[in-house]
Image (cartoon, rainbow, N blue to C red):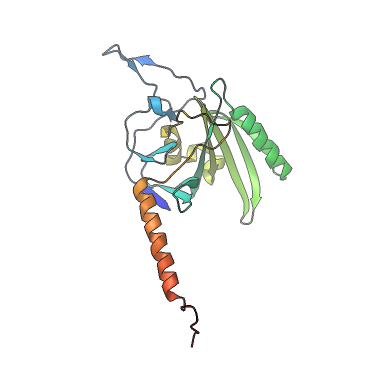
């Protein structure tokens, strides 16, 4: 399933710290939300986004949103693609009192090491990142792991392509990450459990209808019981 995002959202810049900084408007004296993203749903600006449940993805030109979903519309994977670069996204439950990216990052590093891939930490826009080069059937591939701790959630992004070795090449994908909105919900969830992602209702209904039509067509092409093909 693939969505093309053709409308631009305003560029957002996210810092390493996940504070809920509130500024006062010089004109009105009223508090205004922080301009740093990804955003919690409680502080998100009003902009067009693709609603996937726990994640809402901003509209950025020429960025394709590719998802893998089951017949019920439950999403297993979200990947944003721009040219030869890709950004895989995941969002997870976290405790109220502290972030989990430091711990998760170390586990990723150890897992890569066990698979024979060296990983190095580097400072990026969101704080400490993890960069690695792994061997795949297509050859060596660079990966860059980014984590952002929010209020009771953590977003993990994995860059592939040139953007993995050169953050400046992320371009529109970085704008998407900066503008993400997380809807954590109020339910109690185990720490690190993936937050639920789902297709928009109209897309899920269309997918279900297409699958049903395909099944009916396949059934119609099969010989009836007791019949033999000529």
Q: Is residue 49 above or below residue 13?
A: below
Residue 209, given in percent of the width and then of the height, sits at 37, 58
Q: Residue at x 40, y 61 (%)?
A: 212
Out of 15 and 110, give the one closest to the viewer.
110
Where, by quadrant of the figure, is residue 147 drawn? top right
Whether residue 83 is visible here, answered yes or no, is no
Which residue, as the protein is rendered here, is positioned at the far top? Answer: 29
Which residue, as the protein is rendered here, is positioned at the far left? Answer: 27
Which residue, as the protein is rendered here, is positioned at the far bottom? Answer: 230
Residue 82, given in percent of the width and then of the height, sits at 44, 47
Counting labels gives: 0
Q: Is residue 156 above or below residue 208?
A: above
Residue 216, given in percent of the width and then of the height, sits at 41, 67
Whether residue 8 is visible here, answered yes or no, is yes
Q: Is residue 27 above or below residue 222?
A: above
Residue 217, given in percent of the width and then of the height, sits at 40, 70
Q: Residue at x 34, y 49 (%)?
A: 202
């Amino acid at each position: 399933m693939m969505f093309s995002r053709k409308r631009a959202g305003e560029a957002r810049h996210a810092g390493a710290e996940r504070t809920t900084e509130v500024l006062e408007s010089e004109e009105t004296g009223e508090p205004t939300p922080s301009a740093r993203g990804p955003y919690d749903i409680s502080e998100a600006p009003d902009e067009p986004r693709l609603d996937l449940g726990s994640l809402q993805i901003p509209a950025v030109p020429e960025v394709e949103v590719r998802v893998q979903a089951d017949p019920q519309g439950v999403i297993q994977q979200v990947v944003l693609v721009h040219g030869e670069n890709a950004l895989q996204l995941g969002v997870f439950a976290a405790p109220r009192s502290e972030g989990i990216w430091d711990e998760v990052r170390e586990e990723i590093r150890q897992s890569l090491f066990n698979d024979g891939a060296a990983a190095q930490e580097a400072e990026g826009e969101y704080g400490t990142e993890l960069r690695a080069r792994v061997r795949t059937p297509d050859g060596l591939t660079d990966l860059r792991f980014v984590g952002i701790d929010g209020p009771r959630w953590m977003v993990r992004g994995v860059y592939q392509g040139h953007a993995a070795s050169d953050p400046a090449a992320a371009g529109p994908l970085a704008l998407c990450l900066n503008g993400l909105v997380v809807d954590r919900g109020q339910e109690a969830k185990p720490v690190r459990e993936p937050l639920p992602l789902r297709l928009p209702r109209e897309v899920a209904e269309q997918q279900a209808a297409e699958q049903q039509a395909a099944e009916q067509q396949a059934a119609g092409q099969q010989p009836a019981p007791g019949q033999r093909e000529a």
